[in-house]
Image (tube, rainbow, N blue to C red):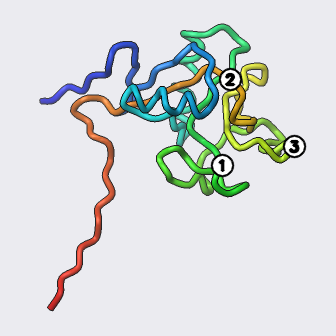
């Protein structure tokens, strides 16, 4: 039997480890910080992951702190993409009512807004917030995409 473990300071949910960083950074610097730690900004793809991340925030931060996670539309306005390159599409969301609104045509990055009970809001990517990273636990490699092969006659 193999046991999965998380790096120091990380907390496991399913087969992914998450950590709250209480050092305000821009979205770009937060992304880089997570990469240097071997992961990405957190990706709350479903209600379970989102609830787990909100519990982590409650354990480590004082409200109304705000936190970056890994969703943006920097490439194409209105096409929300996770930092792993997958599209949000019709997936799970927890937007503040009326969001995303792309106020002033510059809000391309998404964060948990502390003064709105940690619902999602879009914001300029150069704002400085705390952030949450994710890494895969040891013994649980990241999911891979199978590359189709062709055979020639």
Q: Mark 2: which secondary structure?
A: loop
Which residue sits at x=17%, y=87%? 152
Rendered position, 149 above or below 96: below
User: In what quadrant of the picture does the N terminus appear?
Assistant: top left
Label 3 to label 1: alpha-carbon separation: 14 Å
Task: Find the residue positioned furthest to the right.
Answer: 104
Which of 54 and 123 lies nearest the eye of the viewer?
Answer: 123
Spatial separation of the CA atoms under disc 1 and disc 2: 17 Å
Measuring from the top left, give residue 110's x and y in whole percent: 67, 37
Quadrant of res 77: bottom right
Residue at image point 69% right, 15% down: 65
Residue 74 numbered tag = 1
First reached walking from the N terminus: tag 3 or tag 1: 1
Give me the C-alpha separation between circle 2 and circle 3: 18 Å
Kindly indicate the quadrant of the structure image that contains residue 150: bottom left
- Mark seen at residue 31: none
Label 2: few (<14), some (14–19) or many (≥20) C-alpha neighbours in 10 Å = some
First in residue order: circle 2 vs circle 3: 3
Query: Badge 3 is on which residue?
Result: 104
Pointer 2 residue? 128
- In the image: residue 56, left or right of residue 80: left
Judging depth in this view, the residue of 83 and 43 nearest the camera is: 83
Q: How dense is the environment of label 1, judged by Cα within 10 Å: few (below 14), some, or many (20 and up)?
A: some
Total numbered labels: 3
Front residue of 150 and 114: 150
Q: Which residue sits at x=27%, y=40%?
A: 141
| Relative to 14, 106 lies left or right | right
Above or below 9: residue 54: below
Q: Is mark 3 on a helix, strand or loop?
A: helix
């Amino acid at each position: 039997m193999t046991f999965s473990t998380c790096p120091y300071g990380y907390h496991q949910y399913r087969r992914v480890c998450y950590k709250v960083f209480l050092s305000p950074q821009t979205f770009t610097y937060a992304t880089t910080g997570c990469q240097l730690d071997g992961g990405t900004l957190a990706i709350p793809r479903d209600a379970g992951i989102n609830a787990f991340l909100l519990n982590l925030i409650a354990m480590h931060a004082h409200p109304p702190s705000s936190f970056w996670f890994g969703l943006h539309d920097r490439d194409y306005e209105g096409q929300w993409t996770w930092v792993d390159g997958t599209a949000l599409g019709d997936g799970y969301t927890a937007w503040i009512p009326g969001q995303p609104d792309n106020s002033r045509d510059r809000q391309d990055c998404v964060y948990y807004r502390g003064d709105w009970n940690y619902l999602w809001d879009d914001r300029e990517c150069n704002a400085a917030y705390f952030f949450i990273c994710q890494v895969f636990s040891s013994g649980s490699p990241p999911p891979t995409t199978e590359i189709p092969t062709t055979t020639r006659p």
